[in-house]
Amino acid sequence: MLATGLISWWYCDGYKLFAAKLWTKLGDTADLFSIGSLLRTLFAPYRQISANAGGKSIDDKILGLIDRMVSRFVGGTVRLGIVIFGIITLVLQSIGSIISLIVWPVLPLTPILFIALAVMGVAL
Amino acid sequence: MNEFKYNSLRAKYARLGHALDSNVFVTFLWLGIFAPIVFGSIMLFYGSSFGWLMFIISIVCIISLTIIKLLLTKVPVGKTDDINDILSANALAIMDKNPTPKSIAPKLINTRSGRFLALRFGLIPNLMIGVANDLPDDMTAVFENARKIKTQINAPQISGGILSIAIILTHPNHEEILSRMRLSREDLIEGITWYNYLHGLVKASQKKRHDGGIARDFTFGFTPLLSRYGQNLSSTRSLTMKTQLFRAEHKEAIKQMTDIFSNAGRQNVALIGPEGSGRSAVVNAFAEQLLDANSPIPRNLKFRQIFKLDAGALIGGTSGQGDIERLVAGLINEAYSAKNVILYLNDAHLFFENAVGSVDISNLLLPVLEAGRLRIIMSMDEQRYLEISNRKPALTNALNKIMISPANEEETMKIMEDQVPSLEWKYRVSYTYWALKEAYRLGDRYIKDVEMPGRAMRVLEDAARYAHDGLVFAESVQEAIEKSQGVKLQASTSTEEARDRLLNLEALIHEHMIDQEPAVHAVSDALRRAAAGVRNENKPIGTYLFLGPTGVGKTELAKALSEVYFNGESEIIRIDMNEYVEASDVNRLIAEGSVDAMSLTAQVSKHPFSVVLLDEIEKASPQVLTTLLQMLDEGILRDTKNHEVSFRDAIVICTSNAGADMIRENIGSSDYEKIKDELTNHLIQTREFKPEFLNRFDEICLFKPLSKEDLRKITTLLIKNVNKTLAPQKIEVRLDESAVDALIEAGYDPMLGARPLRRVVSKTVENIVAKASLRGDIKSGDILTINENDIKAELN
């Protein structure tokens, strides 16, 4: 009865629970990289504080413009880098999750495979 | 439905999980995963196909670990209402084949919730075994009670703690058992609710919180000045457990703040409420909500950060108005430029007044508030807010006011229950439930400068220093209050010696004064009632009016009381009421401590556990007496700054010579109670006292004139005092009978009582000792015997 219950759990509630955990982990990673937010503000100035505080002369305005352009360039570069890194991470994690979901049902059966390989004398 | 099945699948899972979920076994499984992979790979590398078999061990260990962590230790509740489906994993694990209340009682401590109740409510194994029956049928009743509790508290399953409570409630005399433990059914229900709440917090803290990710603040400016002078509540909060709000008023305040800051209009909020009422908790919870990606707040508020600026610290850290104005202007500019900052000015009233420790920069802040471009939260005391609105109506008109009132008992208990884990972690102690209740009761009674829940929280924090064996009991809380407030709350009946002392108070008082039995009985009874905890706690310990001629022991009794019960004569607060004869003297009597340290209210606020002696009360002005009515009635007097001063731990004694002639003429010849009634009527008719004033006293005590026999006993007491003074010089004075007679003869005056005798003793005995000492006739260790001739020689 215990063994039947455990097998039943592995292929039913356990599988659902495992899938939910993988999904939560993906959500955590997505939140960590906040890709949506990065794309929305891709070329916004980066952590800028001084550009708005300029005076009214032409020189000040030109300086402010240059300051903002530099800040936007830095921001764009940093954000793009994080977006790319985040997407790669998410893709890899998703692939890992799909593989895990495939492996989960066959995991209890793998000992049979290993026994077969051992009996067949397969080695590296 | 209530029949336990030992072989149910959940029960088997629970027992297996209980057996396997140990650190040793789990470590063994982790080793079992990695070691075979390494060895198997090596074997395969060297050509042995048996390396594949090693991987089987790893697979078995992976599956085992997964099953233990995801299934066996949790054992999710079943789908039906059957007891086997709703018992928790921990509860299932302790059940034997045919469980009885007695068989599971000692094992309940092995469940987390059972341990929680044992620690905080005293439901320890010995008690549980004593309460539980050994009949299998009783288990059905226990399960039924447990099911009711589960429904009542809306718990997902029946835990060990619920079973502990159910076992107690199944006992026919459970009310008596709980009463002896100073608990009720409701307290236990509150206890398991408390556990479930904390358990929920722990589970919630294990989940990762979504707070915007690494790019959250990229578009916002740096805040070096704010980081230097302020505290970023958002970064602090994100690291700790979530602030819980238990008060509807606080939740409403957050909703209002969200509305104000997300809509157009003046972007400021003024949280108005007394200190300790939870203004900071509201701001902290708001800060957390802003950082929570899943909270239902408008997008334009998401991930805004709250910087707390402490007005007192800013003002203290600068030198002068110009400096503080420049600093605050810099902080405001930075906050505005950063675009994601909400400023929180704590104790903001300090920025709007010119006094010690404050500075008026309203000219700088008012335009910022009126422009409404920078989001600002201010918190201030209600009284200060009213004062500012009187002086600067334009300023208060520019603020969006949100009122925060003090918490009630239920809310305060919830807040304490929420905060206890962080205090326990900080002080390495555990708080019992009684400690929490006592903290509320005594905080409410003795802490006056902050409001609830701040009062109770402060007491609870102080009590950590008085923990016994790491546990904070109600007694620890009492000890903390005793030390901080100078009152006496415990131990007065805890030892046999203390109990004997209380039972023999009259005799002890008579070591200091003689006779006056009715008054001595009255005050002794009051102290016994107070010590036994049967007095009305919303009044002074006792209020007495001592009437009688001068020099008969009225003041002496007050002093004797202080000596015997109130830790020495320094605990007496004596006010001569003949100094308060004008109506305007009321202000002097109740002056605030910083204005007059010797006023009645100032002295009592410093020494609440005292004898308050108001001498010659008949001479005080009627307005002064009217002022004292609330003190006599409710034990409360408000000083000129409207601070409440408690007299509830004091004995108030008023003395008066009014009606002395009547007492002298009638006492001894008539019934005591009759004379007292006649005298009371006489005092009302002659308008010496108003009836409402006399009615406020617990008892009016008459002091009879002293006889010669009384003076003989008083002489003994006076000589005892002389010897006490001479004790450091090791000199003793003894009087023979003739000397005592001579003293009484010289010191007896029926009109003036014992006072002339005191003067005579001073003039004769003390002079004789002084001269003998100067002449070198006596030295340390000598006994000086004085006779009639010595006395007479001095008198002449």
Image: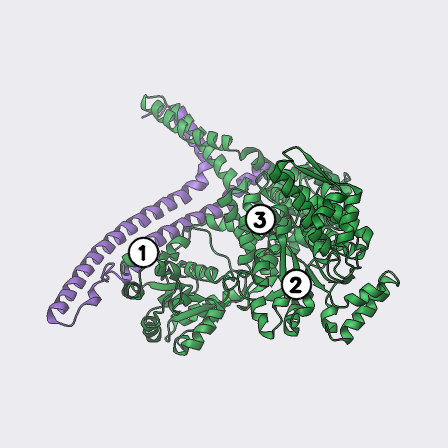
Chain colours: A purple, B green
Please tell me in which quadrant of the rendered image residue B789 appears. top right
In this rendering, is residue A3 above or below B277?
A: above
Q: Tell me the SS state at disc 1.
A: helix
Q: Tell me the SS state at disc 3.
A: helix
Q: CA distance from mark 3 to mark 2?
A: 21 Å
Q: Which residue is mark 1?
A: B227
What residue is shown at x 47% (from left), y 63% (from top)?
B279
Q: How many marks?
A: 3
Residue B342 in view: yes
What amino acid type is highlighted by mark number 3?
Lys
What amino acid type is highlighted by mark number 1?
Ser
What chain does mark 2 sit on?
A: B
Q: What mark, if any, has residue B483 been given in the picture?
A: 3
What residue is shown at x 37% (from left), y 65% (from top)?
B301
Q: Earlier in the sequence, mark 1 or mark 3?
A: 1
Front in this rendered view, residue B13 or B48: B13
